[in-house]
Image: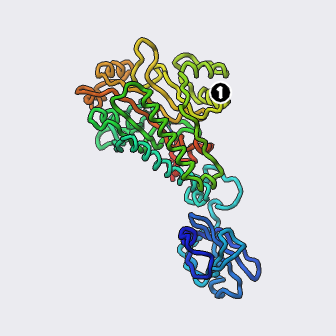
């Protein structure tokens, strides 16, 4: 319990304590009753010998519905019956908010509850320590990401989430009404992070929501996720960007394994930190592995979920968790990626984690004429992107960057079955509430 455990100074001596939390369970055993009170740190036992507790207080406490929010004050006694080594004999209590009956779902019952029921009642689901731990780890993970990039001279930025144009393909754009004209929710900060490369803010990062109008009901797609983006100028090649990501991911995995020990224990997981450097496969090699695994992909095709999984299995067989897939055909990559002249390929990469893409990035096309030509080749109208293209006309350094879906990273790190486990209130084609 917060008041007791965190102080670390309460030796288990007799004294008076006030504890606040939710009533997890009450057991009435005739002459004595036990109430288990829970807060974010754990549980404590309130012991109520009928003869020693005021009858009104005894009556009140023993009839409280589960999950009621209360404050209980009482005498602290040493006990060898509880995990904390102490118990409280109540002398007074305040009921803040009585829980309704029945509960929409149990907190301690060991029955399997459907994911939909859990998400519909997320406030209750999160009272389970093993669920809350995921979000404590997510918070720590973001802290570690920020430390890692700041150490490398990156400046945190915030770019608009309502915009006049999308960067990642028309079909996945959410349109919103912006007064008298249409606007779009940002699919990524791509255009803005590149504009910033022309300013002297030459290493930037952003951690912010990204929106994709994807009608996919899978365990890896949502319509709103948190994207961790980085962009860096004056690079020689995309390998510099890959080396940066590798350093960041290694810092995060190592740090979380250490700092998140208590939470990892709560969910019964460990984090393995892969050896560096992470292997680099080419797209063509992956295509071959996927086709040997039974797929019939042609050059230029997306590897897809199945292809990624087959490659992931092949890498797992070699004990490899994290690996880059580089040299995608330019055709398969967005307009802003630089072509590898004289070949059908591009200076692009994905980072895959046990068979799933968690990041993509590359070197960008920084030459104005080439960029416009690439837009036209992709069927885009450069006029729609004039606010972006202007930044390329007056001295744009060579640059590159990445986008990492932080929920995908967390899911893979913790080996969770569904991206929704890593989002408090997920958004997907059928879920807009809570
Ligand atoms: P991309 O579209 O590959 O690249 O997205 C980057 C990363 O974002 C995550 N992601 C998603 N996570 C959950 N649900 C989704 N629907 C979803 N879509 C994408 C993935 C993915 O690897 N601008 C480029 C990045 C860059 O080149 O800098 C981009 O957005 O983890």
Give the answer, above or below, for where 88 lies relative to 413: below
The answer to whether the beta carbon of the residue marked 1 is less than 8 Å from any atom of ligand 1 is no
Residue 314 position, x and y percent, is: 65, 27
Residue in view at x 57 percent, y 75 percent: 10
Label 1 Cα neighbours within 10 Å, binned few <14 / some 14-19 / many ≥20? some
Q: Position of residue 289 (x, y in %)?
A: 62, 21
Which element carries disc 1, helix, strand or loop?
helix
Scheme of image coloration:
rainbow
Name the residue rendered at 67%, 53% in the picture. Answer: 113
**Outermost residue, left direction?**
394
Q: Is residue 429 visible?
A: no
- What residue is rendered at 35% in x and 22% in y? 375
**Image x and y of residue 52, in percent:** 68, 87
Q: Position of residue 201 (x, y in %)?
A: 30, 38
Q: In the displayed structure, would residue 356 be above or below residue 115?
A: above
Question: Which picture quadrant has residue 355?
Answer: top right
Q: Is residue 346 above or below residue 35?
A: above
Q: Going 69% across and 76% down the picture, which residue do you hit? A: 79
Q: Which residue is mark 1?
A: 314
User: Is 182 placed left or right of 304 in the picture?
Assistant: left
- Say which quadrant the N terminus sits in: bottom right
Q: Which one is nearer the viewer's eye here, 200 or 373?
A: 200
Q: Confirm whether residue 391 shows in the render.
A: yes
- Which residue is at the front of the view, 288 or 79? 79
Total labels drawn: 1
């Amino acid at each position: 319990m917060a008041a007791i455990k965190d102080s670390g100074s309460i030796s288990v001596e007799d004294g008076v304590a006030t504890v606040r939390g939710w009533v997890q369970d009450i057991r009435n055993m005739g002459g004595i009753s036990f109430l288990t009170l829970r807060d974010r740190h754990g549980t404590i036992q309130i012991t109520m010998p009928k003869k020693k507790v005021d009858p009104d207080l005894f009556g009140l406490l023993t009839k409280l519905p589960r999950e009621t929010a209360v404050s209980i004050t009482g005498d602290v006694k040493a006990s060898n019956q509880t995990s904390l080594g102490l118990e409280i004999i109540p002398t007074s209590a305040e009921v803040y908010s009585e829980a309704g009956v029945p509960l929409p779902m149990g907190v301690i019952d060991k029955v399997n509850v459907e994911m939909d029921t859990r998400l519909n009642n997320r406030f209750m689901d999160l009272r389970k320590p093993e669920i809350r731990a995921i979000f404590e780890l997510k918070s720590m993970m973001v802290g570690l990401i920020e430390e890692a990039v700041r150490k490398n001279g990156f400046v945190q930025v915030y770019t608009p989430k309502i915009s006049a144009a999308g960067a990642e393909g028309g079909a996945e754009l959410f349109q919103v009404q912006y007064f008298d004209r249409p606007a779009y929710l940002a699919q990524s900060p791509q255009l803005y992070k590149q504009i910033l490369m022309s300013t002297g803010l030459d290493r930037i990062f952003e951690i912010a929501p990204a929106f994709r109008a994807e009608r996919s009901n899978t365990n890896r797609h949502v319509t709103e996720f948190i994207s961790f983006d980085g962009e860096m100028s004056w690079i020689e090649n995309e390998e510099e960007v890959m080396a940066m990501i590798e350093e960041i991911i290694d810092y995060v995995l190592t740090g979380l394994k250490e700092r998140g020990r208590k939470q990892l224990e709560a969910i019964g997981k460990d984090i393995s930190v892969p050896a560096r450097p992470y292997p680099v496969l080419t797209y063509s090699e992956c295509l071959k592995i996927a086709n040997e695994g039974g797929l019939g992909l042609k050059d230029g095709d997306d590897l897809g979920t199945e292809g990624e999984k087959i490659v992931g299995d092949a890498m797992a067989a070699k004990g490899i968790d994290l690996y880059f897939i580089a040299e995608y055909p330019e055709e398969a990559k967005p307009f802003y990626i630089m072509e590898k002249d004289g070949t059908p390929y591009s200076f692009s990469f994905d980072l895959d984690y046990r068979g799933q893409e968690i990041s993509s990035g590359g070197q960008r096309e920084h030459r104005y004429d080439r960029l416009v030509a690439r837009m036209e080749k992709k069927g885009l109208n450069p006029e729609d992107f004039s606010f972006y293209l202007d930044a390329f006309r007056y001295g744009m350094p060579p640059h590159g960057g990445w986008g990492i879906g932080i929920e995908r990273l967390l899911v893979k790190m913790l080996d969770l079955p569904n991206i929704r486990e890593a989002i408090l209130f997920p958004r997907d084609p059928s879920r807009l509430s809570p």
